[in-house]
Amino acid sequence: MPLTVGTAGHVDHGKTWLVRALTGKNTDRLPEERRRGMSIDLGYAPLELPGGVRASLIDVPGHERFVRNMVAGATGIDVFLLVIDAGEGPRPQTHEHLRILRLLGIPSGVVAVTKADVVGRERLDEALAEARQLVPDAEAVAVSARTGLGLGELGAALARAADRIQPRPSDHPTRLFVDRAFTLRGIGTIATGTLWSGSIGPGDPLTAEPGARRVRVRSVEVHDEALERAEAGQRVAVALPRVSPVDLPRGTALVEPGTYQVSYRLDVALEELEAVPARVTAHHGSAETPARVRRGDAELARLRVAEPLVAAPGDRVLLRAETTVGVGIVLERREPVQVAAAPVARSTQPPHPTDDGRVRLPGGLVLDRAELERARELVVAECEREGTITLARARDLLGTSRKLAQAILERLDGDRVTVRIGESRRLRRRQG
């Protein structure tokens, strides 16, 4: 079963050295990382586990200034490898990373108590006891990246943790969140990320969201090995001709066309570590964006994000202020407003009801009167909350196409419910 293991832990506790000992690969690829001896961005390596399991391993930075990068890696992992220095014990980022793992719903993993060769037996026993108390549902293993102590035991513990993982849904539509895009001479643009669901093979058409940019996969690799098809749970590199890396920033989702909605608003169930403020940073997939939280009944809330997200019901959106404060679990979207019939001929006359209870809209569209009333209520409520509404907001709020949202707004203008001011609409009754 394909799976991804991700490190976590405080800066300088030995994550990257342990990854090198386990995989033989130095995941600090940036010159600045090697100069400073500290991970800044995400690193990747293949990991062979006992029993023939070949996993992908993501090494994340431990410094508090790079938590955003840690989260981008953690959202794609199945099994965690929490690293704790035997001499220092758990430190602030140990606790922060562990909170993130729990909020993201990653329950299975192993604690590696590193630098076991430089402390005495008594201190090592204390460190192992602290690790087991901190994460009681995970095995704790003493290791040394320098001497190789405990590496075999650590691999076996990771394999046992992997056995408890449920496979990712391969029958769901394809969704891959890009965490890196670059150009290779003679090949072109390469995008990498963890395949959350579905599968990818050469020739597959995909859509890069947000932006609805159509791309086609030329080739697929998993850790430098060309595959006919990559499966959910694998770290994937896809070659995408005729697209620039600039058009695939971290956070882009490569999805099966027509399967996922892009949204500025998400209805979520909140799980809070502390009171979630009105303004947060939302992390989803490999994306992050400023967001506003509007609370509803009980633990329900709505997130309004500055940059649209490609989220599905059940996804977890991590919420951070100065620290991690909670998570929003995405709920089912409301039913979108639907066109009631095929477009009719364009008319120069003002919109008016038809004989069968439907309403003609500008642009020749026809809508059920009940749907128009529902759309009017949603637009009015949004304007009362926010003061204005844009076409993009209306499209997302109504869950419909840009063309239909535009027609509905123009109809509301004609009915003197709203008035257009620049690129926004306000309620007409608010105009002096």
Image (tube, rainbow, N blue to C red):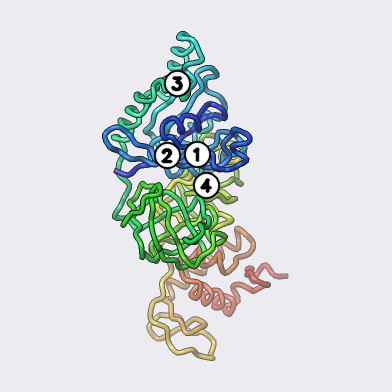
Residue 422, x across and y down, in percent: 68, 72
Residue 30 x %, y %: 58, 43
Q: Secondary structure at mark 1?
A: loop
Q: Which residue is mark 2?
A: 57
Which amino acid, by three-letter code, is at mark 1? Thr
For residue 273, above or below residue 174: above
Secondary structure of residue under mark 3: loop
Give the Cα separation between the discs numbered 3 and 4: 38 Å
Q: Amino acid at mark 4?
A: His
Q: Position of residue 207 (x, y in %)?
A: 44, 64
Q: Is label 3 or label 1 in front?
A: 3
Give the farthest residue toward the top: 122
The part of the image, by quadrant, that contains residue 93 is: top right
How far is the residue under mark 2 from the one under mark 3? 21 Å
Query: Which residue position is annotated with label 3?
Result: 147
Picture residue at 47% right of the left edge, 16% below the top: 117
Above or below — where is 41 with respect to 332? above
SS for callout 4 = strand
Labelled pair 4, 2 in contact (Cβ < 8 Å): no
Marks 3 and 1, how far apart in space? 19 Å
Task: Please rate how many residues cluster around mark 3, counting C-alpha atoms within 10 Å: few if below 14, some from 14 to 19, many from 20.
Answer: few
Which comes before the other along the chain, label 4 or label 2?
2
- Residue occupied by mark 1: 27
325 vs 305: above or below: above
Pointer 1: residues within 10 angstroms few (<14), some, or many (20+)?
Answer: many
**Residue 420 occupies which quadrant of the picture?**
bottom right
Image disc number at residue 283: 4
Image location of residue 275, percent across then percent down: 56, 37
